[in-house]
Image (tube, rainbow, N blue to C red):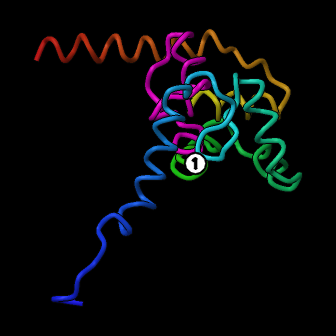
């Protein structure tokens, strides 16, 4: 309470422990298979395995009934956000490096590719990864050109 003495080190210690653990993780974040206790897929196929592992059959049946756009639109802010945060697409991970190596740099674009590709995987369609990559690269190129004109 007010006026009572306290041990600042005792209060800070749990938070410093977490920060130190995260700093160690940061040194290997682009190569390690887990960050903050969550498995990080290594590539798109590994994403499919992970999603298949935690979605039950009834969820997959529902997803197959939607169009690609419906699925992506419905999943982007919920499941897409989960992927961006837990698979460390914002902070950097081996999955974000995989996408960076393909020329994709924005986490929203990464999760968009995962969502569209997963729907295509479930429905037996060609994933057309190169086409998806080109779509996002063209978008950013056009956006940057428009910003330069302003």
Residue 41 forms part of the magenta stretch: no
Principal secondary structure, stretch drawn in magenta: helix
In the picture, residue 123 is in which quadrant?
top right
Which quadrant would the C terminus be assigned to in this image?
top left
Residue 82 visible in the current orientation: yes
Q: Is residue 108 visible?
A: no
Give me the residue at 80% from left, 50% from top. Answer: 55
Residue 126 in the figure: left or right of residue 96: right
Nearer to us in this view, 109 or 5: 5
Which residue does the image show at 41% across and 58% down from the upper left?
15
The residue sitting at 60% across, 24% down in the picture is: 94
Q: Nearer the viewer, residue 135 or 19?
A: 19
Q: Is residue 86 magenta?
A: yes
In the image, which residues are magenta? 83-111
Expressed as whole percent of the image width and height from the top left, the position of residue 48 reads 77, 33
Q: Residue furthest right?
A: 57
Question: Residue at 56% across / 32% down in the picture?
Answer: 112
Image quadrant occupied by the N terminus: bottom left
Position in image of residue 42 (x %, y %): 70, 24
Considering the numbered disc 1 on the image, is that residue within a helix, a strand or a loop?
helix
What residue would you read off at disc 1? 82
- Asked if residue 6 is positioned above or below residue 77 in the image, the reply reads below
Q: Please tell me which residue lies in front, 46 or 69.
A: 46
In the image, 149 versus 21, the foreground residue is: 21
In the displayed structure, 18 sits above or below 96; it is below
Note whether 38 is above or below 46 in the view shown: below
Residue 129: percent from left, percent from top: 66, 15
Q: Are there few (<14), some (14-19), or many (20+) residues within 10 Å of tag 1?
A: some
């Amino acid at each position: 309470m007010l006026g009572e003495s306290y041990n600042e080190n005792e209060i800070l210690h749990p938070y410093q422990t977490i920060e130190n653990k995260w700093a160690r993780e940061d040194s290997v974040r682009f190569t390690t298979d887990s960050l903050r206790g969550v498995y990080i897929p290594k590539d798109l196929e590994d994403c499919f395995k992970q999603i298949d592992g935690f979605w039950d059959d009834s969820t997959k049946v529902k997803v197959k009934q939607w169009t690609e756009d419906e699925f992506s639109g419905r999943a982007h802010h919920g499941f897409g956000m989960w992927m961006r945060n837990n698979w460390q697409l914002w902070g950097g991970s081996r999955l974000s490096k995989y996408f960076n190596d393909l020329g994709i740099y924005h986490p929203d674009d990464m999760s968009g590719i995962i969502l569209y590709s997963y729907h295509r995987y479930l429905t037996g369609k060609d994933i057309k990864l190169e086409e998806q990559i080109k779509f996002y690269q063209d978008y950013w190129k056009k956006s940057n050109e428009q910003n330069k004109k302003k």
